[in-house]
Amino acid sequence: MAPMLHAAGYEIVFVARGLRLRDHLNRTGRIEIQLVDGPTREQVIVKGVRAIEMTDQAALSREIVSADLIASCVGPSNLKSLGIVIASGLTHRRAPVNLIAFENCEGAGSILRRAVAAADGPVDSHGFASGLIHRVICRRRWYQDSDTPIRYTADPESKCEIEAAGLRVPMPTIAGMTLVQDHTAAARRKFFTYSAAHAAVAYLGHLKGYYSIHAALQDLEIRGIVKKVLKEGQRGLDFCYGAGFSGGKAERQRICKRLSNGALRDTIARVGREPLRKLGGQERLIGAASLALLANSKAKALSWVTAAALCYFDPEDASSRQLHALIENRGAQYVLQTISAVDLDQDFVSRTIRHVKQLSTWSRSSHLITIKPALWASRPMPAAAIAG
């Protein structure tokens, strides 16, 4: 959001986690965003930025009191913790202000509002809106003792959608920003197409030993499943929100092109992290499957990807370790019934559990073994298939 708001005339004040990051931002006074798309490069510089530290409550309150707009982007799992951080500053405000929670979840604005209310902060006079950022930011690089600004690597996607109903103060016209009346529909359109496909590449790519998203998508089998995931997600969206809502073939092609952007060097580990959250009932896989099932789709591809997500294990990711422990102790079906917390079609659940059992016996070192049941690892593969 920083380039968009800076271009619209806003001064940017970051709330930094840690003194070193705060001091670095104040010393350099700017950030750089490298927008990459294949061989194309564009550098965007946001100048005149400054920062305060998150635990400096006095400074934070002063900025909240005087701000024309407050925005957060801390990850859905951390959103509730912002209530106590924001509440005291809002208590001293005289004028209403909009707070926009840019998170990859439905109802982020409402979650933030409840968190502030729980911390005894005033909420009735202020706007709490959900926001969707469509740009992928995959890397941040900075050297804390240098005068080189923080550099982010991102794709050139500039789309941003904000929940109109959550606003209390009129928003100025800002290039790239769109106010949407049905934020839930907009969020699902993103989650059940792009985000579902993104997750599919990550979880299937992890099983086959790939490191990066763009490399995994070149795998013909993974690419085929991803295309089916997109079709299943779109079928559910169009069933619920009207024909054409999902964008059809053109949107599928656009999404695959974005995911194929090798210049991003986006990693499987970054996209696959927090699998427990991403297996939630309203999230990109189970949520997409639920809508697809309503549209009389069997959601076969989403079943495969859900199984791959249940098999995902990254020892560096706490959520992945927790998921692995749950499956070890209680089983994959328990996770689907409790973590996903939706009344899923039993055929979908049974199919997914069968896939989990198949994937669990598969060796990641066997990169060329297909994940199709008809050519499973236990069945000898033709020499031509191995060579291919």
Image (cartoon, grey):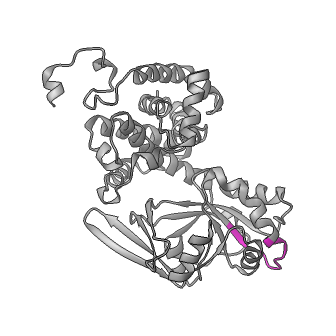
Q: Is residue 235 visible?
A: yes
Percent position (x, y) of residue 374? Answer: 30, 18
Q: Does the magenta stretch include residue 190?
A: no
Percent position (x, y) of residue 26? Answer: 57, 81
Percent position (x, y) of residue 264? Answer: 35, 59
Front-most of 164 and 120? 120
Q: Give the range drawn in magenta.
A: 89-99
Q: Is residue 29 visible?
A: no
* Residue visible at 45% across and 48% down in the picture: 271
* Residue visible at 50% across and 43% down in the picture: 316
Quadrant of the rendered image containing residue 82: bottom right
Is the residue 76 above or below the residue 53 in the image?
Answer: above
* Residue visible at 31% across and 44% down in the picture: 217
Front-most of 195 and 26? 26
Q: In this view, does 339 lie to the left or right of 85?
A: left
Q: Is residue 189 left or right of residue 108?
A: left
Is the residue 140 above or below the residue 225 in the image?
Answer: below
Percent position (x, y) of residue 200? Answer: 42, 40
Q: Is residue 94 magenta?
A: yes
Return the residue found at the far front: 145
Q: In this view, does 358 lie to the left or right of 216?
A: right
Q: In this view, does 92 lie to the left or right of 384?
A: right
* Residue visible at 69% across and 58% down in the picture: 109
Quadrant of the rendered image containing residue 321: top right
Is the residue 43 above or below the residue 301 in the image?
Answer: below
Front-most of 254 and 236? 254
Q: In which quarter of the image is the C terminus?
A: top left
